[in-house]
Image (cartoon, rainbow, N blue to C red):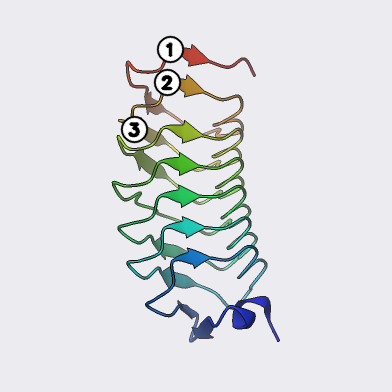
Amino acid sequence: MARYEEYGYEIENGVGIIPEWTMEIGEEAFNGCKDLESICLPKWVKKIGYKAFANCKNLTNVTLSEWIQEIDNSAFEGCENLQSLSFPRWVTKIGKSAFEGCSSLTSISIPTSVTAIGEYAFSGCSSLTNVSISSSLSKFNKHIFAGCSSLIDITIPPSVNFIARN
C-alpha cells in the first residue's frame, strides 16, 4: 500500500484525489509518487505537511486551497516539473526548502499574509525569473533564492528590515 492510500487519498489518471473533509495533507503523503501529475487541494485544507509532495517528478500543476495557511518544510522539494503556483491570500508560512529544486517554476507572487519564509524555500528554482513579495515580511532568511540563476526581477517590500548573509 502506498503512503497516500494510508491517508485515504487516491490517484486517478495522474490526478490526486483528496477527500473534501481533509484539513491537512499528511507528512510524506505523496513523497516520491511518480504517478502524480496534478493536484487540486480541497477548500478546507489548511496545512501541507513535511515532504507531502516532495520528489513528485511528474507533478506539473498544483491548485492550493483558498484557506491554506502553512506550507511545511520540504513540502514540494524536488518537484522539478512544477510549472506554476498561486499562493492564496491566507498563507502565513512557507517552510524551509518548501519549493527547493522546483526547476520549472517561472514566477511567484507572495501575498501580504506571509510573515515567514524559511531558508532555501525557493533555492534551485533555476527557471524562476520574477518574484513579487507584497507581504508583511520583515526578515529574509538566508539562501531563499540561492541557485535561481534565471532570476531577473524581485520586488522586496519596504517591511523587510533584515536580509541574512548567504
Name the residue tied to disc 3: 132
For this view, does 123 lie left or right of residue 85? right
Crowding at dot 2, Cα within 10 Å, few <14 / some 14-19 / many 20+, comes out as some
Q: Position of residue 120 (x, y in %)?
A: 61, 35
Name the residue tied to disc 1: 161
For the residue pair 115 and 121, the one nearer the viewer reads as: 115
Nearest to viewer (mark 3 / mark 2): 2
For the residue pair 18 and 61, the one nearer the viewer reads as: 18
Nearest to N terminus: mark 3 or mark 2: 3
Q: Amino acid at mark 3?
A: Ser
Q: Amino acid at mark 1?
A: Asn
Residue 122, quarter of picture: top right
Q: Helix, strand or loop at disc 1?
A: loop
Q: Is residue 77 above or below residue 116?
A: below
Name the residue tied to disc 2: 138
Contact flag, marks 2 and 1 (Cβ < 8 Å): yes
Q: Is residue 135 above or below residue 165?
A: below
Residue 121, quarter of picture: top right
Identified at 40% across, 41% down, the residue is 92
Nearest to viewer (mark 1 / mark 3): 1
Nearest to N terminus: mark 2 or mark 1: 2
Q: CA distance from mark 3 to mark 2?
A: 15 Å
Q: Position of residue 74 (x, y in %)?
A: 62, 50
